[in-house]
Amino acid sequence: MTTTVSSDQRPGLRAYEDSIRLPFPELVSKLREMLGVRLVAYIGGVKSARSVSAWADGAGQPSEVDRERLRHAFHAGALLRERYDTVTVQSWFKGMNPSLNDEAPAQVLREEEPLTGAREVVAAAKSFAYIG
């Protein structure tokens, strides 16, 4: 017998589900509300807030790798938003993180190979949200 666990029963599952199910423009809009346009632009590999607005409007998209990075950022951010306000989430993404060798989560997402960075950042987010 298989037991289905709803996202209401497992902390962080809703964040994961939303990160893979949301249409990209909606994900960018929510991520922009959560992190601010400059941080989304940084993680997405652009310097212009206009690019982020275009993505949110569905008028363009970053590269596949950068879309993946933004989905991972959303996963970690939404997980943190289950327990913290947006100011705390933004500070967490920008600040030195002892779980990430004192690098900022946004920097790890931007500079590491996407899957490796995602594993590290999501694990650090879970640790901060559910253990710390």
Image (cartoon, rainbow, N blue to C red):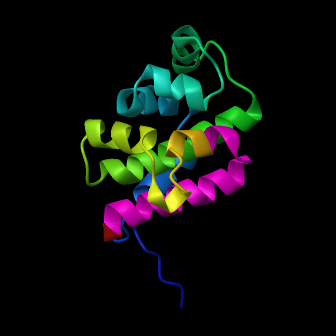
Q: Is residue 40 magenta?
A: no
Name the image quarter holding the C terminus: bottom left
Number of marks drawn: 0
Q: Nearer the viewer, residue 60 or 85?
A: 85
Report x, y in % for residue 53.
51, 13
Report x, y in % for residue 24.
58, 31
Report x, y in % for residue 20.
58, 48
Outermost residue to the bottom: 1
- Report the residue at 40% width, 47% height from top: 78
Magenta span main SS:
helix
Q: Is residue 114 magenta?
A: yes
Identify the magenta region.
109-130
- Report the residue at 36% width, 28% height from top: 33
- Report the residue at 39% width, 53% height from top: 79
- Residue 82: in sight, yes or no? yes
Q: Is residue 4 above or below residue 99?
A: below
In the displayed structure image, the side of residue 5 where residue 123 appears, left or right: right
Name the image quarter holding the N terminus: bottom right
- Report the residue at 45% width, 47% height from top: 96
Report x, y in % for residue 117.
64, 52
- Residue 21: in sight, yes or no? no
Q: Is residue 6 above or below residue 34?
A: below
Q: Nearer the viewer, residue 25 or 125?
A: 125
Q: Is residue 26 above or below residue 110?
A: above
Q: Nearer the viewer, residue 7 or 32?
A: 32
